[in-house]
Image (tube, helix red, strand yellow):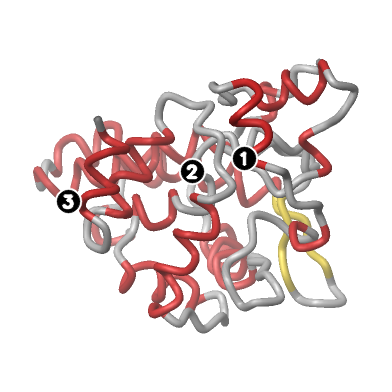
Amino acid sequence: MPDNSRRQYHVNLAVAYNVWQHWQVTGDLGFLLRHGAELLVETTRFFACRASADLASSRYDLRGVMGPDEFHDVIGPALGGELWDRIGLATGELDHWDLVSRGRRVPFLRSGLLAQFEGYDDLAELDWPRYCARYGDIGRLDLLLEAEGDLTNRYKASKQADVLMLFYLLSAKELAAVLGRLGYDLDTSSIPATVDYYLARASHGSTLSRVVHAWVLAHTDRARSWGLLR
């Protein structure tokens, strides 16, 4: 099978997320000035330069990348001074980042739930009970299907918690604010339905999958959450 892992640029975002969490928890201004701000700026530069504008919809798309979904190949001035001079941060860059941060495209299913990606609705449903009964451990569903002459690209199937990572990293309020900045309204009451929808379509082929699912279920189904964590 082709290895497109070199396109998994989302790993950079995990670094930026951790830098920001570290700053929020510790208030370590020295870390932010020496290392953190530069990591955040360079990561933002990278994704801003990879975002291509769709003039027809006034949205930005990241193309030629591989997201956490491994089953589908979908192609401050007040502290500035020496720091901003060293990084070379320009006002034009900030304006462009602001534009991109408000224009990124977010796809939704026809039901109104967040979509794994655009076109996910049109994929076939997998016969999960049949595959579980036949193989037991279906974590590497991609290899099982390939051995049968089939492809995961055809199905609504996830190796791990992809969409649900949003609820792992962000609170409902934070996620609603992010989507609101992009011009989308998130009905937070739809979150449990979103969790159920993708949990029913996950093979847990990643060691991280059950941990993430356990977290997002912790407030709604503690027994199921504990079972997944164990």
Q: Is residue 13 above or below residue 96?
A: above
Residue 179: percent from left, percent from top: 49, 73
Residue 157: percent from left, percent from top: 66, 43
Looking at the rendered structure, the kind of residue marked 2 is: Ala
Quadrant of the rendered image containing residue 155: top right
- Label 2 to label 1, Cα distance in Å? 19 Å
The residue at 68%/22% (across/down) is 6
Q: Is residue 49 visible?
A: yes
- SS class, disc 2: loop
- SS class, disc 1: helix
Q: Quadrant of the C terminus?
A: top left
Dot 1 or dot 3, earlier in sequence:
3
- Label 1 or label 3, whichever lies nearer to me, is 1
Task: Please report contact status of discs 1 and 3: CB closer than 8 Å, yes or no.
Answer: no
- Of residues 186 and 222, the one nearer the viewer is 222
Looking at the rendered structure, the kind of residue marked 1 is: Pro
The residue at 71%/50% (across/down) is 62
- SS class, disc 3: helix
Quadrant of the rendered image containing residue 8: top right
Dot 2 or dot 1, earlier in sequence:
1
Residue 23: percent from left, percent from top: 19, 45
The residue at 61%/41% (across/down) is 158
- Of residues 147 and 58, the one nearer the viewer is 147
- Label 3 to label 2, Cα distance in Å? 25 Å
The residue at 59%/47% (across/down) is 201
Task: Please report contact status of discs 3 and 2: CB closer than 8 Å, yes or no.
Answer: no
Judged left or right of residue 52, residue 149 is right
Residue 49: percent from left, percent from top: 68, 47
Q: Which residue is mark 2?
A: 161
**Pointer 3 local density, CA inside 10 Å: few below 14, some 14–19, many at least 20:** few
Q: Which residue is mark 1?
A: 129
Q: Which residue is mark 3?
A: 24
